[in-house]
């Protein structure tokens, strides 16, 4: 099994995906263990002094003015975890919780938190045992960290609360730790606070969304090319020299992908023979511009994620010169903004894909295709309601595009008077990514059927490879009306798993 070694300088996106989705094992480097020990010495020295230090010998948030005596500090750390584990609602997905725990471990290992090495080892042990704390949908405002979600994870380290075992069964965390020979941690000064104070949940969801969107944007380029082909559109608008004079990298990449898929097509450009069109509709002609803008948005979001993956987000932090200083680095604004921006781009990509699908189904705009791509229009309804479903999904995508980060609700007796809502931005982006895959699947279903209905014209070799692969995956081709949901579900699974991209790349080579 792949092993990810956590050091002091952060982790990569591929590390997060390996741990969260592939169950990779986690190990701590010797450098990280040394940094943990050194930072802990600083915290222990401060704890022995009479002067109050935030997070070490004081209360938290609006209660930071109270000095906590040494005999109460262990209780203080336990209590912050227990009281902050106040989430509600449905359980969060296992991959999100594993990303959350792993990214918190990444910050702990930076040597800036003051957590003891044994706490970090326990975090790694829990991940390696396949124990997943029960984390709930609601409880984070994206400021002072993803407090409630991280608290539920810390509660598991203490042997309290509920967690899911490697067999998928939810049980008391203490039982699961005992079965795997893991001793619950007894938190000391600063440690409870350090386990809660980070942007780890929203960052983990950002990393996974970027990975999924990379596949979906390539998939959308392919389906846009298939639709252009089915509509007998012209691929002249994809010429590299046209995109070079508006030098957005994403636009050039999308146009290049579409051109690669269409290479050798016997359908593109045929409308000029008997039904002249000066230009194709925007949804076809401007596909690279819209998808390209989304790609450039992803590039910016990936840069933010890269910086955050290298960050140590905690408050207070232990600095290399031995100072322990308060800060505001836990504020989720940098991550929240790009999570919202990605949801806007996903909504627009879904919107243009739906417009292309509708054009394929409308006999007045499809240039010779049967109404709704039906076998016997009137007797058969064809894909009429598949487009309804796609439209409903796009409507939801537009609602999910409303930014969460534009909101703020003060908390903690006005001490935390401006929050990022980044966790909420991440949660709605996950739903948006799921819905975008379904929207692209409907366009794929319609475009492949439409191409097959163009009898006497030969599709591009890449298009043929896609059609063959999607049919082999159980998505049926043209014919009389049938129960449609299974076909749409199979198309969705085909897109989501990356099989659409793989099928096209067997002909085109790697797409951009």
Image (cartoon, rainbow, N blue to C red):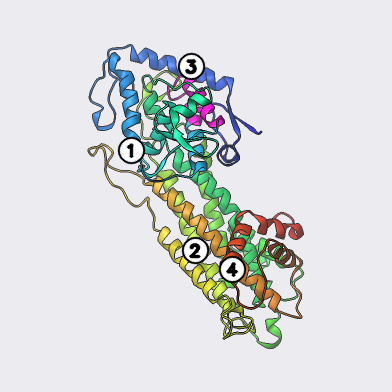
The mark found on residue 348 in the picture is 2
Of the two numbered discs 2 and 1 in the rendering, the one whose residue sits closer to the viewer: 1
Number of the front mark, 4 or 1: 1
Q: Earlier in the sequence, mark 1 or mark 3?
A: 3
Q: CA distance from mark 4 to mark 1?
A: 42 Å
167 relative to 226 in the view: left or right: left
Residue 154 occupies quadrant: top left
Q: Which part of the image, by quadrant, shows the N terminus? A: top right
Mark found first going from the N terminus, 3 or 4: 3
For residue 238, side relative to residue 70 (left or right): right
Whether tag 2 and tag 3 are in contact, CB under 8 A, the answer is no
Under circle 1, the secondary element is: loop
Element type where label 4 sits in the image: helix
C-alpha distance separating marks 3 and 4: 56 Å
Residue 311 in the image: state x and y as whole percent.
Answer: 48, 34
- Comparing labels 3 and 4, the label whose residue is closer to the camera: 4
Q: Is 337 contained in the magenta span?
A: no
Of mark 4 and mark 1, the one earlier in the sequence is 1
Query: Which residue is disc 3 drawn over?
Result: 37
Q: Which residue is mark 4?
A: 443
Q: Is label 1 in contact with label 3 (beta carbons under 8 Å)?
A: no
Alpha-carbon distance for marks 2 and 3? 49 Å
Report the residue marked by disc 1: 86
Q: Quadrant of residue 60?
A: top left
Disc 4 from disc 2: Cα separation: 15 Å
- Mark earlier in primary sequence (4, 2): 2
Front disc: 4 or 2? 4
Task: Specify start and end residues of the magenta stretch as a single range.
Answer: 105-129
Q: Residue at x 64, y 77 (%)?
A: 231
Where 327 falls versus 184 (above or below)? below
Is the magenta region chiefly helix, strand or loop?
Answer: helix
Mark 1 or mark 3: which is in front? 1
């Amino acid at each position: 099994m792949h092993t990810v070694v956590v050091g002091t300088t952060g982790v990569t996106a591929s590390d997060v995906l390996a741990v969260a989705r592939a169950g990779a094992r986690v190990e701590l480097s010797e450098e990280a263990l040394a940094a943990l020990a050194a930072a802990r010495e600083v915290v222990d020295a401060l704890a022995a002094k009479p002067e109050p230090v935030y997070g070490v010998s004081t209360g938290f948030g609006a209660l930071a003015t109270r000095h906590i005596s040494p005999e109460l500090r262990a209780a203080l750390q336990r209590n912050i975890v227990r009281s902050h584990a106040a989430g509600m609602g449905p359980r969060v997905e296992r991959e999100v919780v594993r990303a959350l725990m792993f990214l918190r471990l990444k910050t702990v290992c930076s040597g800036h938190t003051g957590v003891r090495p044994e706490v970090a080892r326990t975090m790694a042990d829990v991940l390696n045992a396949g124990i997943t704390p029960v984390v709930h949908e609601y409880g984070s405002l994206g400021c002072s960290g993803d407090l409630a979600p991280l608290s539920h994870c810390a509660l598991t380290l203490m042997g309290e609360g509920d967690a899911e075992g490697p067999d998928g069964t939810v049980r008391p965390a203490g039982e699961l730790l005992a079965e795997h020979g893991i001793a619950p941690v007894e938190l000391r000064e600063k440690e409870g606070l350090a386990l809660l104070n980070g942007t780890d949940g929203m960052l983990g969801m950002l990393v996974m969304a970027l990975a999924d969107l990379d596949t979906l944007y390539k998939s959308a380029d392919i389906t846009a090319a298939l639709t252009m082909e089915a509509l007998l559109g012209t691929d002249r608008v994809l010429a590299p020299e046209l995109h070079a004079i508006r030098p957005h990298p994403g636009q050039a990449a999308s146009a290049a992908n579409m051109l690669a898929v269409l290479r050798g097509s016997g359908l593109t450009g045929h409308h000029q023979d008997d039904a002249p069109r000066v230009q194709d509709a925007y949804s076809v002609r401007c596909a690279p511009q819209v998808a390209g803008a989304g790609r450039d948005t992803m590039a910016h979001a990936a840069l933010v994620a890269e910086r955050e993956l290298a960050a140590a987000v905690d408050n207070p932090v232990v600095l290399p010169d031995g100072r322990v200083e308060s800060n505001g680095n836990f504020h989720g604004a940098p991550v929240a903004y790009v999570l919202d921006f990605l949801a806007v781009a996903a909504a627009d990509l879904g919107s243009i894909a739906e417009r292309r699908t509708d054009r394929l189904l409308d006999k007045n705009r499809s240039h010779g295709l049967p109404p709704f791509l039906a076998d016997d229009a009137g007797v058969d309804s064809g894909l009429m309601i598949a487009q309804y479903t796609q439209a409903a999904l796009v409507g939801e995508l537009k609602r999910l595009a409303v930014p969460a980060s534009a909101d703020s609700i003060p908390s903690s007796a006005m001490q935390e008077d401006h929050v990022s809502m980044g966790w909420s931005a991440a949660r709605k982006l996950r739903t948006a990514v799921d819905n975008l895959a379904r929207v692209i699947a409907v366009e794929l279903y319609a475009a492949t059927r439409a191409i097959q209905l163009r009898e006497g014209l030969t599709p591009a070799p890449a298009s043929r490879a896609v059609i063959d692969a999607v049919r082999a995956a159980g998505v049926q081709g043209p014919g009389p009306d049938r129960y449609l949901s299974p076909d749409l579900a199979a198309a969705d699974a085909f897109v989501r798993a990356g099989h659409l991209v793989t099928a096209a790349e067997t002909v085109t080579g790697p797409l951009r």
